[in-house]
Image (spheres, grey):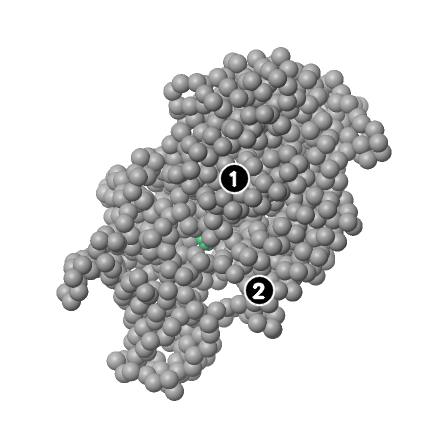
Amino acid sequence: MDSRLDTAPPHAIHLRDYAPPAWLIDTVDLHVDLREEAATIRSTLAVRRNPAAASATAALDLDGQELELLAVRVDNRVLGPDDYTLTPDRLTLAGLPDQATVEITTRTRPQDNTALEGLYKSSGNYCTQCEAEGFRKITYFLDRPDVMARYTTTIEAERARYPVLLSNGNLTANGDSATEAGRHWARWEDPWPKPCYLFALVAGALVHIEDRFTTRSGREVALRIYVEPGNEAKCGHAMESLKKSMKWDEDVYGLEYDLDIFNIVAVSDFNMGAMENKSLNVFNTKYILAQPETATDTDFLGIETVVAHEYFHNWTGNRVTCRDWFQLSLKEGLTVFRDQEFSADMNSAPVKRIQDVQRLRQVQFNEDAGPTAHSVRPESYIEISNFYTPTVYEKGAEVLRMYRTLLGHAGYRKGIDLYFARHDGQAVTTDDFLAAMVEANGQKPTDPLWAQFQRWYTQAGTPVVSGEGRHDATAGTYTLTLRQTLPATPGQPDKAPQVIPVALGLLGPDGQDLPLTLEGEREAGATTRILALTEAEQSFTFVDVPQAPVPSLLRGFSAPVRLDFKQDDAALTFLMAHDSDAFNRWEAGQTLATRLILADVDARAQGGETAAPQAYIDAIAQTLARAGEDRTFAALALALPTEGYLGQQRVLVDVDGIHAARLGLRRTLARELNGAFRKAYDGNRTDGAFTITPDAMGRRALKNAALAYLMALDDAPARALCLAQYQGAATMTDAIAALALIADSAMDERASCLADFADRWKHEALVMDKWFAVQALSDRPDTLDRVRGLMEHPSFSIRNPNKVYALVGSFTANPSKFHAADGSGYAFLADTVLTLDKLNPQVASRMVKPLARWRPYDTGRQEHARAALERIVGTAGLSRDVYEIVSKSLA
Ligand code: PHE
Ligand code: ZN
């Protein structure tokens, strides 16, 4: 009855096999009857043959999984078992007229649905999750995004237990059951045709907060956020974020909301962050609930971004959707780019850009370098759930940013406008998107530049841009030579050059930007120029450059590439101090720190150690001294590159060497600049009133960055400060920052602080997630034992994704513990993945990814990892999800 593997390995689905559906579904009338024993779903479909289909005789072949089929009727005639074919994943009806009404009744057991896909229960309430292929677990259907239908949904349930009944669109009727006491029903109609992955229903004992938004053209929209009772007071920030998003989309994209109601429901059991179902977004509570006492500044910002992301999908994803799941980045890359720019506008743009790039590098570059590397528009998949990846999302967003860099803001907006003018109401491809972008600007997709641009969608891997500059003092010219290479990835041994927009500035000796004139130009141009690197190697010569400049490349991170540009430490220190591009000021510091740490890793491997040069320490002192200009920026500039990022710079990752060298540099800075860190701490205390203004958040970020340095020495004054902060914290930001440092330390109070925190917050699930995370991320030698123990803690549940991500996910993000040389981390993860896979394949598959990336380690670790992976893949009844990741990693 389910989709698990028995013996035959599952087959892959290929983009090249796409064919239009043989049938279309115009309307869907669902009747959902919810009872404690089971849910019964009666679905009435108006189907007709697709005139665009290849075959005019094909049967109606419906997807369905884990369903109990109760009845089928066609045009009111009851079908017998001989009139259809039923397999574990399809229901096939042959010999239908060209147009028919098909009525199918199925039964499911939501209370037993631990995979959290289809119809399931969370905290006693019913909810659904249909993207990508969950609708087929509710009823038999053409479960593919290019089948768009109009839905009417009637939900019936017990009134006392499930007073709130919601679905997509408008509430058109409701009442008491005519036949059974205590039951009620509600009917919802969605006027907008949509693919079934955007269907949703909710039934439960929920409370809501309400607000209104008036659109630019005067439509009054009711906004509601539904939560479990007791959480009403935690929804205010999400509601403000929603209103800001609605306004921003009108102002920046000219896009208005298209219904009179917009509902959000927050549920505590959810595999992902949130889901953009038409007018009924379902959210993980993590991205709705926030109060200063329970949520950190990062949480507040995450809520703003995710609420915006799901709202923005109403146009980019819902009004215009994907033809097939290979096109996923059509909606996700674009919507991530939109939410990134929204958050940049609401907060500090440079800070947001740095954080987005950090994330891209940490997770997407890592994916690109491993066994599951795939292009933004993948060619094939075994399980589509595995393709909600950093490549499709974050690299996809970078592709959108590059369109805008190449076409300019106005050109980009023209392209967007043409995209909606052409494709509103359609299910389309990334090629359609590219055509709209390009043609709106008077160009053609076949023009060499755009033909090359398409490779950003089709080639996997992170391009490496290397090069050097040469100043000719006599001619007064500066010549920049750049080269690009793209490493081979699984299934793609050979690659061709891509167009890489390189934003460039040249700093004069005074630190000021020079106006840039390329050879052959008559007038000086802007101080930041976009160079289109299209060849494997290319040179750009600038004139009127009397003195040797310091180049600033890839300003604002203008392309998702690794930059390997020859530049000495002095030039980097100069850029740290003077670059007008904030991103590159930060980047110069990171590049320098990376060099220092990696040099020390090598020295340590030889039994030595290297010391940080005074110039670097002075540069960090400068960063601290100027921190008041932008405190959040300063906090980011003070943070050293992560162990993960440092590891990516190496063919063979020296786990312990990197850990030790990074800690060594933190300690050196803490020792050398102790007074300055202490001053930064004292000068940015924010005890008292809580606000989430950039200034207040900046103060907290800087203060906590300083505290982290001070605690690197783990001495008595630092411990006292940290303990006092924990005990007196007015915000979760300050409390958890201190607790994380305490959890890393060998302080006597460690156990009592952790116990105190758990006691205080045991009734707040999201806060307990933080408690699990700080312990799983701890640097203490017994972290794995503690993690094992915490899996038995009453607040932990392996069925709740947030808990698994907090405890198990955080542990895998703790390199020196997860990659312990004895293989204990790998064995633990394999055990956990096997347990998880029986309950929730999507979560299991996400958790196994760090293990799948086993190659860049020494042979001892490799052997342990292989053994763990082979144990997983040798287990009977594995899900397709985990099978795909593990088999690719062993290939
Ligand atoms: N489409 C959701 C988003 O990006 C993510 C998601 C995918 C949620 C699959 C649930 C299941 O906003
Ligand atoms: Zn999305």
Q: Residue furthest bottom?
A: 82
Label drawn at residue 104: none
Residue at 46%, 77% (x, y): give it: 87
Residue 598: % across, % down: 75, 33
**Mark with earlier residue (1, 2):** 1
Q: Secondary structure at mark 1?
A: helix
Q: Is residue 517 above or below residue 239?
A: above
* 64 with respect to 509 (left or right): left
Residue 658 versus residue 357: which sits nearer the camera? 658
Q: Quadrant of residue 786?
A: top right
Residue 184: % across, % down: 20, 59
Q: Is residue 776 visible?
A: yes
Residue at 70%, 48% (x, y): give it: 823
Q: Is residue 682 above or below residue 264?
A: above
Label drawn at residue 772: 1
* 468 with respect to 161 (left or right): right
According to the picture, the residue beneath numbered tag 2 turns out to be 878
Q: Is the distance from the Cβ of mark 2 to the nearest ligand 1 atom less than 8 Å? A: no
Callout 1 environment at 10 Å: few (<14), some (14 to 19), or many (20+)? many
Q: Is residue 534 visible?
A: no
